[in-house]
Image: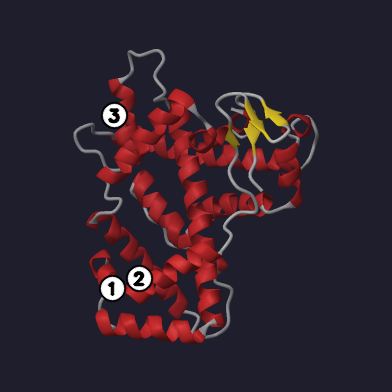
């Protein structure tokens, strides 16, 4: 629970035991029900891909930094899943959300976060950027809670629109259970985890993909040829085309294998006292992979 103690907004990522099992099981079931791996989810992604391409076309082939709009696309897909809403990329509310996420992602890649990982008990009592980091996480949580309030006013248990509605229904089912993990706090932290885990990882993968294809034009040419031959230039690619695009799929897998998404891995913990070489790692001690 060490990471969860210092970064409480990431319970879905850092928690363990009963809370982790319940939140993970519910999240996966709800995401599947709303189309993860199905046509309905694919349509959301295709719509966002079309909006992303429109933003690219606006540059009129001039040099530009794609970092921001490549982060907007996955963030918007998560918005549509969480609260059934997508934003224009210049919408003020969306820009506020993106700023919260982007600033904290910058901090995750900084030197201080590595120090924080090594000495969390000490750092928590000292001033520094980690205070602002925590504030942004709380701001993101409050942003989600505002969306929850809007949903509560129009919530219909017989017609769930999104992840928030499903969570509210689960809260209603377990309202007489004093030990239930389904409460507003965990709803907000689930949403925070989805934004934080899904936005930047996808954005980095897209950016690295563009960079590597530019560096290897012969690979880009083969991918382009296969897509043109199988799909053509007037249709959007879909999951049903996957089996007909072996070279493209292999290229995507190789990009994911090659790149580094985060400066360090997620923390783990041992479930019992563990001896490793000449060291003894006590039960539940946090372990970081380097």
247 shown above or below 67? below
Residue drawn at 30 percent across, 35 percent down: 166
Q: What x and y, as percent, mark residue 206?
A: 49, 67
Q: For residue 143, say whether it is visible.
A: yes
Mark 2–mark 3 Cα distance, whole angstroms, equals: 33 Å
Q: Tell me if 210 is positioned left or right of 29 in this view.
A: right
Q: Secondary structure at mark 3?
A: helix
Residue 278 on image: x %, y %: 73, 33
Lower position in the chain sequence, tag 2 or tag 3: 2
Residue 188 or 35: which is nearer the viewer? 35
User: Mark 1 — residue?
Assistant: 236
Q: CA distance from mark 1 to mark 3?
A: 35 Å
Residue at image location 45% in from the left, 82% down from the top: 220
Q: Earlier in the sequence, mark 1 or mark 3?
A: 3
**Horizontal relation, residue 198 to residue 7: left or right:** left
Up the image or down, 285 lies above or below 206; here it is above
Residue on which the image places disc 3: 169
Q: Position of residue 163 (x, y in %)?
A: 34, 40
Foreground: disc 1 or disc 3: 1
């Amino acid at each position: 629970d060490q990471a969860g103690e210092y970064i409480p907004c990431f319970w879905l990522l850092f928690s363990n035991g009963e809370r982790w099992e319940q939140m993970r099981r519910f999240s996966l079931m709800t995401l599947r029900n709303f189309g993860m791996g199905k046509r309905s989810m694919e349509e959301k992604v295709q719509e966002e891909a079309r909006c992303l391409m429109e933003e690219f076309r606006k540059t009129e082939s001039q040099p530009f930094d794609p970092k921001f709009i490549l982060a907007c696309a996955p963030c918007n897909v998560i918005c549509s899943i969480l609260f059934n809403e997508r934003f224009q990329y210049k919408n003020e509310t969306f820009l506020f959300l993106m700023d919260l996420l982007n600033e904290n992602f910058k901090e995750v890649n900084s030197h201080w976060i590595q120090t924080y990982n090594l000495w969390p008990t000490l750092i928590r009592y000292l001033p520094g950027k980690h205070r602002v980091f925590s504030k942004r996480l709380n701001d993101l949580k409050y942003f989600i809670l505002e969306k929850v309030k809007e949903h509560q006013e129009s919530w219909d248990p017989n017609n769930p629109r999104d992840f928030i509605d499903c969570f509210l229904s689960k809260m209603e089912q377990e309202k007489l259970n004093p030990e239930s993990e389904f409460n507003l706090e965990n709803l907000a932290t689930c949403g925070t985890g989805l934004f934080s885990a899904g936005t930047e990882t996808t954005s980095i993968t897209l950016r690295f993909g563009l960079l590597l294809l530019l560096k290897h034009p012969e690979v880009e040419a083969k991918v382009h040829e296969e897509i043109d031959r199988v799909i053509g230039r007037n249709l959007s690619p879909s999951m049903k085309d996957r089996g007909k695009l072996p070279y493209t799929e292999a290229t995507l897998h190789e990009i994911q294998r090659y790149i580094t998404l985060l400066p360090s891995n997620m923390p783990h913990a041992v479930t019992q006292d563990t001896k490793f070489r000449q060291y003894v790692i006590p039960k539940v001690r946090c372990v970081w992979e380097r």
